Image: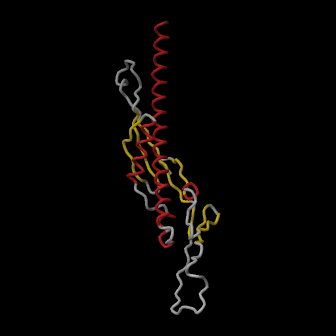
Amino acid sequence: MIAGLLLLGFVYFVVGKAAVVRNGAQTAADAAALAAAQDARQQLREGWLGVIDDPAQWQQFVRGDGYESELACQKAMVFAARNGATVEGCSPTGLGFKVTVRSTDTVGDVVVPDRKSQQAVASAVAVIEPRCSFDGPEPTEDPEPTSTPSADPEDPLPIVGLVCDGSPQVIDPEDPDLPDAGVLFRVRLTGDDE
Protein backbone atom coordinates (compact mmCIF):
# COMPACT_ATOMS: atom_id res chain seq x y z
CA MET A 1 0.00 0.00 0.00
CA ILE A 2 2.82 2.40 0.84
CA ALA A 3 4.48 1.58 -2.49
CA GLY A 4 1.21 2.36 -4.27
CA LEU A 5 0.93 5.74 -2.52
CA LEU A 6 4.55 6.56 -3.38
CA LEU A 7 3.94 5.66 -7.02
CA LEU A 8 0.78 7.76 -7.09
CA GLY A 9 2.64 10.73 -5.55
CA PHE A 10 5.44 10.29 -8.06
CA VAL A 11 2.98 10.30 -10.98
CA TYR A 12 1.31 13.46 -9.67
CA PHE A 13 4.71 15.12 -9.34
CA VAL A 14 5.69 14.29 -12.93
CA VAL A 15 2.33 15.39 -14.32
CA GLY A 16 2.47 18.61 -12.30
CA LYS A 17 6.01 19.37 -13.46
CA ALA A 18 5.00 18.74 -17.08
CA ALA A 19 2.07 21.16 -16.69
CA VAL A 20 4.37 23.83 -15.25
CA VAL A 21 6.82 23.44 -18.14
CA ARG A 22 3.99 23.55 -20.69
CA ASN A 23 2.42 26.65 -19.11
CA GLY A 24 5.82 28.35 -18.97
CA ALA A 25 6.36 27.68 -22.66
CA GLN A 26 2.94 29.14 -23.52
CA THR A 27 3.70 32.23 -21.43
CA ALA A 28 7.00 32.62 -23.28
CA ALA A 29 5.29 32.24 -26.66
CA ASP A 30 2.65 34.83 -25.75
CA ALA A 31 5.27 37.30 -24.52
CA ALA A 32 7.45 36.77 -27.59
CA ALA A 33 4.58 37.24 -30.06
CA LEU A 34 3.41 40.38 -28.28
CA ALA A 35 6.96 41.74 -28.20
CA ALA A 36 7.36 41.23 -31.95
CA ALA A 37 4.04 42.92 -32.72
CA GLN A 38 4.75 45.82 -30.36
CA ASP A 39 8.18 46.34 -31.91
CA ALA A 40 6.60 46.40 -35.37
CA ARG A 41 4.01 48.89 -34.08
CA GLN A 42 6.78 51.18 -32.82
CA GLN A 43 8.61 50.86 -36.15
CA LEU A 44 5.41 51.91 -37.93
CA ARG A 45 5.11 55.04 -35.80
CA GLU A 46 8.76 55.97 -36.32
CA GLY A 47 8.48 55.44 -40.09
CA TRP A 48 5.34 57.54 -40.14
CA LEU A 49 7.15 60.32 -38.28
CA GLY A 50 9.80 60.22 -40.99
CA VAL A 51 7.24 61.26 -43.62
CA ILE A 52 4.94 63.32 -41.43
CA ASP A 53 5.41 66.40 -43.64
CA ASP A 54 4.26 64.43 -46.69
CA PRO A 55 0.68 63.21 -46.17
CA ALA A 56 0.75 61.53 -49.60
CA GLN A 57 2.94 58.83 -48.00
CA TRP A 58 0.79 58.28 -44.91
CA GLN A 59 -1.51 55.54 -46.21
CA GLN A 60 1.12 52.78 -46.04
CA PHE A 61 1.53 53.43 -42.32
CA VAL A 62 -2.21 53.79 -41.71
CA ARG A 63 -2.60 50.30 -43.24
CA GLY A 64 0.22 48.89 -41.09
CA ASP A 65 2.82 48.47 -43.85
CA GLY A 66 6.42 49.50 -43.52
CA TYR A 67 8.21 47.61 -40.75
CA GLU A 68 11.13 45.19 -40.71
CA SER A 69 9.98 41.78 -39.49
CA GLU A 70 13.56 40.67 -38.74
CA LEU A 71 13.94 43.43 -36.13
CA ALA A 72 10.60 42.52 -34.59
CA CYS A 73 11.60 38.85 -34.41
CA GLN A 74 14.83 39.80 -32.64
CA LYS A 75 12.69 41.41 -29.96
CA ALA A 76 10.67 38.19 -29.76
CA MET A 77 13.88 36.24 -29.09
CA VAL A 78 14.78 38.55 -26.21
CA PHE A 79 11.39 38.12 -24.54
CA ALA A 80 11.35 34.36 -25.08
CA ALA A 81 14.75 34.10 -23.37
CA ARG A 82 13.50 36.19 -20.44
CA ASN A 83 10.73 33.63 -20.02
CA GLY A 84 12.90 30.52 -20.22
CA ALA A 85 12.48 29.58 -23.89
CA THR A 86 14.13 29.81 -27.29
CA VAL A 87 12.40 30.89 -30.49
CA GLU A 88 12.05 28.10 -33.04
CA GLY A 89 10.06 30.15 -35.52
CA CYS A 90 8.98 33.74 -35.96
CA SER A 91 7.14 34.84 -39.06
CA PRO A 92 4.85 37.69 -40.08
CA THR A 93 1.23 36.68 -40.63
CA GLY A 94 -0.50 39.52 -42.42
CA LEU A 95 -0.58 42.26 -39.81
CA GLY A 96 1.03 40.32 -36.99
CA PHE A 97 3.43 37.57 -36.00
CA LYS A 98 3.32 33.87 -35.23
CA VAL A 99 6.02 32.80 -32.80
CA THR A 100 6.87 29.22 -31.80
CA VAL A 101 9.10 28.60 -28.79
CA ARG A 102 10.72 25.64 -27.06
CA SER A 103 11.17 25.72 -23.30
CA THR A 104 14.68 25.56 -21.92
CA ASP A 105 13.30 23.83 -18.83
CA THR A 106 12.57 20.10 -18.96
CA VAL A 107 10.09 17.88 -17.18
CA GLY A 108 12.71 17.20 -14.53
CA ASP A 109 15.56 15.16 -13.24
CA VAL A 110 13.34 12.30 -12.23
CA VAL A 111 13.95 8.99 -13.93
CA VAL A 112 11.02 8.57 -16.30
CA PRO A 113 11.61 6.91 -19.66
CA ASP A 114 11.64 9.43 -22.52
CA ARG A 115 10.60 12.27 -20.21
CA LYS A 116 13.79 13.44 -18.53
CA SER A 117 14.82 15.72 -21.38
CA GLN A 118 11.37 16.49 -22.76
CA GLN A 119 10.76 20.18 -23.41
CA ALA A 120 7.50 21.93 -24.14
CA VAL A 121 6.75 23.62 -27.45
CA ALA A 122 4.13 26.37 -27.73
CA SER A 123 2.95 28.89 -30.32
CA ALA A 124 1.19 32.22 -30.16
CA VAL A 125 -0.07 34.76 -32.67
CA ALA A 126 -0.23 38.50 -32.01
CA VAL A 127 -1.90 40.89 -34.43
CA ILE A 128 -1.49 44.60 -35.11
CA GLU A 129 -4.79 46.38 -35.70
CA PRO A 130 -4.72 49.88 -37.19
CA ARG A 131 -6.93 52.21 -35.16
CA CYS A 132 -6.80 55.16 -37.56
CA SER A 133 -8.00 56.20 -40.98
CA PHE A 134 -6.73 59.06 -43.07
CA ASP A 135 -8.50 61.01 -45.76
CA GLY A 136 -5.75 63.13 -47.25
CA PRO A 137 -6.35 66.47 -48.87
CA GLU A 138 -7.72 66.31 -52.38
CA PRO A 139 -5.20 67.43 -54.98
CA THR A 140 -6.21 70.76 -56.41
CA GLU A 141 -5.56 71.81 -59.98
CA ASP A 142 -5.23 75.54 -60.18
CA PRO A 143 -3.36 76.45 -63.38
CA GLU A 144 -3.38 80.17 -62.65
CA PRO A 145 -2.33 81.48 -59.26
CA THR A 146 -4.81 83.79 -57.62
CA SER A 147 -3.82 87.35 -56.95
CA THR A 148 -4.61 86.99 -53.23
CA PRO A 149 -3.36 83.73 -51.78
CA SER A 150 -5.62 82.19 -49.16
CA ALA A 151 -2.72 81.52 -46.82
CA ASP A 152 0.80 82.81 -46.33
CA PRO A 153 3.18 80.25 -47.89
CA GLU A 154 5.40 80.68 -44.83
CA ASP A 155 2.59 79.38 -42.61
CA PRO A 156 1.54 75.91 -43.77
CA LEU A 157 -1.95 74.77 -42.89
CA PRO A 158 -2.49 72.09 -40.22
CA ILE A 159 -2.75 68.53 -41.53
CA VAL A 160 -6.24 67.22 -40.95
CA GLY A 161 -8.07 64.03 -41.93
CA LEU A 162 -6.43 61.62 -39.48
CA VAL A 163 -9.07 59.97 -37.28
CA CYS A 164 -8.12 57.44 -34.58
CA ASP A 165 -10.95 55.53 -32.90
CA GLY A 166 -13.38 58.26 -33.94
CA SER A 167 -11.22 61.07 -32.55
CA PRO A 168 -9.87 63.57 -35.11
CA GLN A 169 -6.15 64.27 -34.85
CA VAL A 170 -4.73 67.56 -36.08
CA ILE A 171 -1.03 67.64 -36.95
CA ASP A 172 0.68 71.01 -36.52
CA PRO A 173 3.14 71.45 -39.41
CA GLU A 174 5.23 73.84 -37.29
CA ASP A 175 5.77 71.16 -34.64
CA PRO A 176 4.70 67.87 -36.27
CA ASP A 177 4.07 64.93 -33.97
CA LEU A 178 1.90 61.83 -33.89
CA PRO A 179 -0.07 60.27 -31.07
CA ASP A 180 1.57 57.40 -29.17
CA ALA A 181 1.91 54.06 -30.96
CA GLY A 182 -0.86 52.61 -28.77
CA VAL A 183 -3.28 55.24 -30.08
CA LEU A 184 -2.35 54.48 -33.69
CA PHE A 185 -2.33 50.65 -33.48
CA ARG A 186 -3.77 48.03 -31.15
CA VAL A 187 -1.76 44.85 -30.43
CA ARG A 188 -3.43 41.70 -29.10
CA LEU A 189 -3.05 37.95 -28.96
CA THR A 190 -5.32 35.86 -31.11
CA GLY A 191 -5.93 32.20 -31.83
CA ASP A 192 -4.46 30.45 -34.86
CA ASP A 193 -7.97 29.88 -36.22
CA GLU A 194 -8.87 33.59 -36.44
Q: Is residue 137 above or below residue 125?
A: below
Closer to the camera in the image, 97 or 35: 35
Q: Is residue 8 above or below residue 35?
A: above
The residue sitting at the front extreme is 154
- Residue at (47% x, 51% y) in the render: 39
- Residue at (51% x, 72% y) in the render: 55
Q: Position of residue 93 (x, y in %)?
A: 43, 54
Closer to the camera in the image, 37 or 109: 37
Q: Is residue 169 above or below residue 145?
A: above
- Residue at (52% x, 47% y) in the render: 189
Q: Position of residue 72 (x, y in %)?
A: 42, 50
The residue sitting at the top extreme is 1
Q: For this view, does 96 lie left or right of residue 88? A: right
Please count the marks in the image. 0
Q: Position of residue 141 (x, y in %)?
A: 52, 87
The colour scheme used to paint the residues is secondary structure
Q: Position of residue 100 (x, y in %)?
A: 41, 42
Closer to the camera in the image, 151 or 101: 151
Closer to the camera in the image, 184 or 25: 184
Q: Is residue 189 above or below residue 85?
A: below
